[in-house]
Image (cartoon, rainbow, N blue to C red):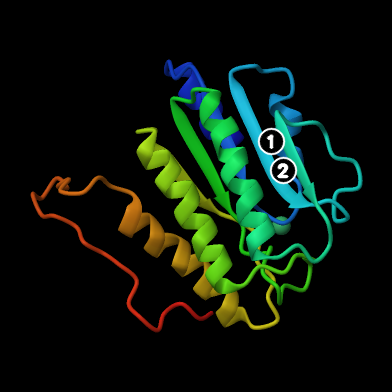
Amino acid sequence: MAVAIRVLQRDGVERVAVIDLDVHHGNGTAFIFESDPRVFTFSMHQQHNYPMWKPRGSLDIGLADGTGDSEYLGLLKDALLEVMASAPDVLFYLAGADPYEDDQLGGLRLTCEGLRARDRLVIQQARQGRVPMAVVLAGGYARSVDDTVNIHVATIEEAKAHGHRAGERNKHGVERHVHPRVGEEQC
Ligand SMILES: [Zn+2]
C-alpha cells in the first residue's frame, strides 16, 4: 500500500489518507509516512496487542481489550471526520477482519454486524466526501475460517452497495444495485 501511495504521489496526487482498521496498529504505514505531511495515517486498533512499540501516526486510537460494536462505531464516526478534514485526494481503507469477537489474535469484540456497519460508515464517508477510495483486505484469524471469509465478503458487498452515487452508471451503461440480501448478516 505504501508503494501504491508513493506511485500516486509521483503521479501528482497531493494528499492521501489511510484508514487502518486492522486490530493491530498500522505500524508500517505510520513509520513509512511519519515525516510526510501529505499522508494522513489513521489507525484504530487494540492497544494491548502487537506491536509493542507503535510508531506515531497522524491519528491513533488504541482501544481497550474487549471493546464492542457501539463504542467502536461511535469513536470511528468522530475519527472519520478528522480523516476527511485532512482533505485527502485519495483514501486507502484497510478492512481488517481481526477486530472480530472470535478472532484468535485479536482481543476486540466486534460482531459480524458491527464489522459490516464499520465498513458501511467508512465507505459512505468516502462517497459523501467524493473521495476515491481503494479497499484493501487485511488480517483475519477467526477460529472458523468461514467467518473470516464472510467478513471479507461483507466488506466487498458494502463497497458494491454503497461505493457509488445513486443512479451512477458503470462503463457498460448499466446501473448497479447490489445490496446484501436478508440473512447474509451472519458470519
Ligand atoms: Zn492484524
Specify whether 106 is left or right of 145: right
**Is residue 3 visible to us here?**
no
Residue sticking out furthest to the right: 52
Which amino acid is tagged 1?
Answer: Thr
Label 1: few (<14), some (14–19) or many (≥20) C-alpha neighbours in 10 Å: many
Q: Label 1 belongs to which residue?
A: 29
Q: Is the shortest distance between ligand 1 and the CB of mark 1 under 8 Å?
A: no
The answer to whether residue 162 is seen in the rendering is: yes
**Which residue: 62% across, 57% down?**
96
Q: Position of residue 145 (x, y in %)?
A: 61, 79
Q: Is residue 82 above or below residue 110?
A: above
What amino acid type is highlighted by mark number 2?
A: Gly
Quadrant for residue 59, please give it: top right
| Residue displayed at 48% across by 35% down | 91
Of the pair 139 and 7, the residue shown nearer to us: 139
Q: Answer with the quadrant where ligand 1 appears in the image.
A: bottom right
Distance, label 2 to label 1, CA atoms, is 6 Å
Q: Which image quarter: residue 69?
A: bottom right
Residue at the image position 45 percent from the left and 56 percent from the top: 120
The image quarter in which residue 13 lies? top left
Q: Give the class, few, some or many, for how many residues have Cα within 10 Å of label 2's Cα (few <14, many ≥20).
A: many
Residue 126 location (% of width, % of height): 42, 40
Q: Horizontal placement of 168 versus 135: left or right? A: left
Residue under circle 2? 26
Q: Is residue 49 above or below residue 184?
A: above
Q: Nearer the viewer, residue 123 or 78?
A: 78
Is residue 94 positioned above or below 147 on the image? Answer: above
Mark 1 element type: helix
Q: Residue 80, how many percent across, how many down?
A: 56, 39
Element at badge 2?
loop
What is the residue that sits farthest to the left in this orientation?
173
Whole-percent x, y for residue 152 in the image: 51, 66
